[in-house]
């Protein structure tokens, strides 16, 4: 039984995972409403909210049947906001020490949690058959798309993770959030862009696609953001108000085209047996549909993380602590916060 804590940014989350049954409890406190008033995440406020809400969530986990059988504590230790991560790590250390058995403590990289999140549903369907069913999906190509990271990675037959490409500048989610801010839509930007895009024409504006060469797997979205700013400078406020759906649809399509094109290029280069989609932007329905078509064209199944496991959540941290062979139990003294992109 694994207890997991996730406090990397603006979601306070706790989960319990039983390898024989799957996730038996997930509890989350969202800070979106708080940070929306400020137009984005305020680190000090996020840390304060974790401090207020982590203990009540842990109390709910303690009341769950099976908690007494706990054998490990897992915690996100990077990347993320330093203060938020430090609070979660400190709480996890205290829990691991306070339990009568002094259970091992495992540090889980937040991005590795995302990388393995598409397989949570596969395990839930038949826990006893998970290893055999997972083996049929390897080697695996994954697209991780979030507010802070955009990358392609592979998992080989031994579940060794290799980063194939990242973004040279903005992440896809960051580009969507910044686009929404330029349009005056508010926070969080990605879902608001998607909402308006559903009412617009995706070919109304010719926004650029960065790094289009087939030989190049890396992403770039900074030019797209600049192009939107230049376009808005040519328009009056009244024009922008009327054309917001078209602007959102065209802007979102430029992001999605880049993601799908690079993923398709990567599929052509390897003998992959499955395609994965994870991260907060994975909730975008147009992206899911486009990648489903790309996977079908390549004759491989699409393994997309469930909506509740796309954003910051403790369920994926608990699952990765069990399923990812690279995530090993570490002595308490060795657990440190990992800043930046560190998947190894």
Image (cartoon, rainbow, N blue to C red):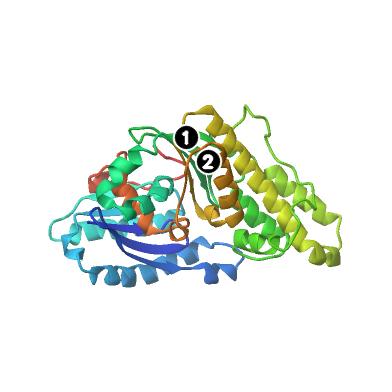
Question: In this rendering, would 129 be left or right of 265?
Answer: left
Q: Nearer the viewer, residue 285 or 231?
A: 285
Q: If the image is split into quadrants, where does the C terminus sit? A: top left
User: In this image, 166 relative to 261: left or right?
Assistant: left
Splitting the image into 4 quarters, where does residue 69 fall? bottom left
- Please tell me how many numbered marks the rendered image carries: 2
Q: Nearer the viewer, residue 290 or 115?
A: 290
In the displayed structure image, the side of residue 231 where residue 248 appears, left or right: left
Residue toward you, 138 or 80:
138
Q: Position of residue 212 (x, y in %)?
A: 68, 34
Tell me residue 94's x, y (percent): 24, 59
- Residue drawn at x 32%, y 38% is 326
**Does the residue at mark 1 contact the one at mark 2 (Cβ under 8 Å)?**
yes
Checking the image for residue 163, the label placed there is 1
Circle 2 packing at 10 Å, graded few (<14), some (14-19), many (20+), is many
Q: Which residue is mark 2?
A: 151
Sequence-first disc among 1 and 2? 2
Spatial distance from mark 1 to mark 2, Cα to Cα?
7 Å
Residue located at (38% from left, 67% from top): 51
Q: Secondary structure at mark 1?
A: strand
Q: Quadrant of the N terminus?
A: bottom left
* Residue under the image location 30 percent in, 39 percent down: 325
**Is 250 located above or below residue 241 in the figure?**
above
Q: Residues within 10 Å of mark 1 (few under 14, many from 20)?
A: some
| Residue 90 in the image, given as x and y percentages of width and height | 31, 57
When the figure is inspected, residue 156 is found, relative to residue 191, above or below; the finding is above
Residue 127 appears in the rendering: yes
**Vertical side of 202 occupied by 64: above or below:** below
Q: Tag 2's secondary structure?
A: strand
Most foreground residue, 8 or 29: 29
Image spot of residue 193 (x, y percent): 66, 60
């Amino acid at each position: 039984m694994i207890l997991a804590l996730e406090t990397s940014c603006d979601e306070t989350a706790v989960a319990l995972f039983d390898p024989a049954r799957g996730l038996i409890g997930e509890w989350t406190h969202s800070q979106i409403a708080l940070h929306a008033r400020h137009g984005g995440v305020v680190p000090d406020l996020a840390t304060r909210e974790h401090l207020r809400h982590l203990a009540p969530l842990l109390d709910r986990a303690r009341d769950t049947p099976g908690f007494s059988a706990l054998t490990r504590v897992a915690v996100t230790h990077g990347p993320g906001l330093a203060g938020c991560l430090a609070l979660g790590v400190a709480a996890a250390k205290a829990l691991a020490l306070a339990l009568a058995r002094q259970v091992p403590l495992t540090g889980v990289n937040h991005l590795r949690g995302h990388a393995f999140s598409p397989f949570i549903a596969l395990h839930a369907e038949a826990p006893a058959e998970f290893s055999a069913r997972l083996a049929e999906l390897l080697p695996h190509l994954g697209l991780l798309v979030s507010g802070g990271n955009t990358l392609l990675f592979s998992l080989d037959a031994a579940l060794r993770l290799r980063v194939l490409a990242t973004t040279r500048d903005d992440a896809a989610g960051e580009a969507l959030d910044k686009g929404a801010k330029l349009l005056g839509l508010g926070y969080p930007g990605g879902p608001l862009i998607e909402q308006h895009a559903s009412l617009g024409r995706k070919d109304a504006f010719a926004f650029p696609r960065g790094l289009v060469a087939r030989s190049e797997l890396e992403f770039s979205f900074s030019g797209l953001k600049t192009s939107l700013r230049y376009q808005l400078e040519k328009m009056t406020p009244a024009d922008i108000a009327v054309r917001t759906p078209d602007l959102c649809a065209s802007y979102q399509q430029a992001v999605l085209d880049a993601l799908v094109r690079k993923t398709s290029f990567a599929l052509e280069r390897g003998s992959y047996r499955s395609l994965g989609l994870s991260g907060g932007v994975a909730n975008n329905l147009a992206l899911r549909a486009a990648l489903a078509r790309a996977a079908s064209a390549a004759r491989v199944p699409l393994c997309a993380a469930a909506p509740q496991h796309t954003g910051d959540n403790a369920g994926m941290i608990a699952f990765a602590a069990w399923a990812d062979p690279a995530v090993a139990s570490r002595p308490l003294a060795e657990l440190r916060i990992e800043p930046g992109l560190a998947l190894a």
